[in-house]
Amino acid sequence: MRIASLLPATTEIVGALGRADDLVAVTFECDHPPGLTAPVVVRSALAEGMTPSEIDRTVRERAAAGLPLYDLDRDALRDAAPDVVLTQDLCQVCALPGRTVTGALDELGLADVAVHSFDPHTLDEVLTGVDALAAAVGADATALLDDLRRRLAAVERAVAGEPAPRALVLEWTDPPFLPGHWVPELVRRAGATPTAGVDGGRSTTVAWADLEPPEVVVVTPCGYDLDAAVAQAGPVVERFPGVPVIAVDSAAYVVRAGPRLVDGIEALAHALHPDVVPAPPAGRVARVA
């Protein structure tokens, strides 16, 4: 089966199912599994090197003007000749919207290509979504899901009975955004209590002055790796003197709705409860203050 994955999370899932060799098209953000050779057919319309505040302003301006945040290479998608296209309609900021994909397929004479939309809002929906995606590409997710659920249960046992500090989780720092979708649940599963956020909903902006004092701050800037998260945590440390601040590789382990969400839970659980949860591999989480 020839698979076009237009979402980093679905590319990760396809790889975890052992079907990476079937990928014939991916996005500029698809970096897992390593060694992908499929052509890139989706690129960002945003310039590289922008600051968080510049990105926020540009996203708002483009949205107000009705301009897209992603460019789809229609010719490359047609040449890829996919049997199935994996897309999403969960977030127009995070990835190419599914309606853009279906419209492009119609224009290219590919209306008969199967389209599978991956739109989880909670961790349970991520897991059930993995199973549904596996069925869409003719794979079996049983072993993968059994392993993920076993690891989640191990973290739950480890942090049971431990103090659950009140955690301010920031999905963006300039301006500050509170988490939505599955992120508050990830923090609870790691053994903390989010001070704010919307389970299953969208992340929301907030004024610094309206934030209640936390016992720990978790900085997970959407789409950024650990080094960038550490850098963006610097000003946050200044706002909360004396409060522990933890940075997480959000791009890989927090906002991407794939199997590595469980890696993120394990990493954050160790940062919060190092005496009861084993240390993760380097590069996932860091104590900043």
Image: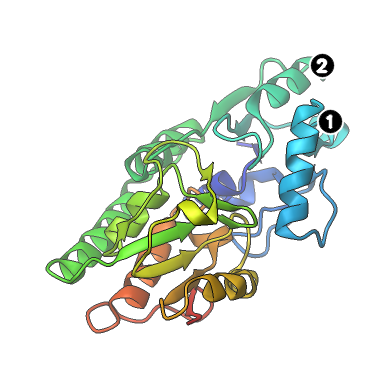
Residue bearing mark 1: 74
Q: Is residue 159 above or below residue 41?
A: below
Is residue 174 in sight in this rendering? yes
At a point 36% along the width and 45% down the height, the residue shown is 123
- Identify the amino acid type marked 2: Glu
At a point 64% along the width and 27% down the height, the residue shown is 98
**Label 1: which secondary element:** helix
Q: Residue 197 or 45: which is nearer the viewer?
A: 197
At a point 62% along the width and 30% down the height, the residue shown is 84
User: CB under 8 Å between callouts 1 and 2?
Assistant: yes
Q: Residue 15 or 174: which is nearer the viewer?
A: 174
Q: Is residue 94 above or below residue 229?
A: above
Q: Is residue 17 above or below residue 237?
A: above
Residue bearing mark 2: 107
Q: Position of residue 240 (x, y in %)?
A: 47, 72
Q: Is residue 79 above or below residue 263?
A: above
Residue extending farthest to the left is 161
64 left or right of 207 in image: right
Q: Earlier in the sequence, mark 1 or mark 2?
A: 1
137 left or right of 1 in image: left
- Judge the density around disc 1: few (<14), some (14-19), many (≥20) Cα neighbours within 10 Å: some
Q: Position of residue 40 (x, y in %)?
A: 78, 47
- Identify the amino acid type marked 1: Arg
Residue extending farthest to the front is 209
Q: Which numbered disc covers residue 218?
A: none
Q: Could you tell me how far apart the alpha carbons at marks 1 and 2 are, in whole angstroms?
A: 9 Å
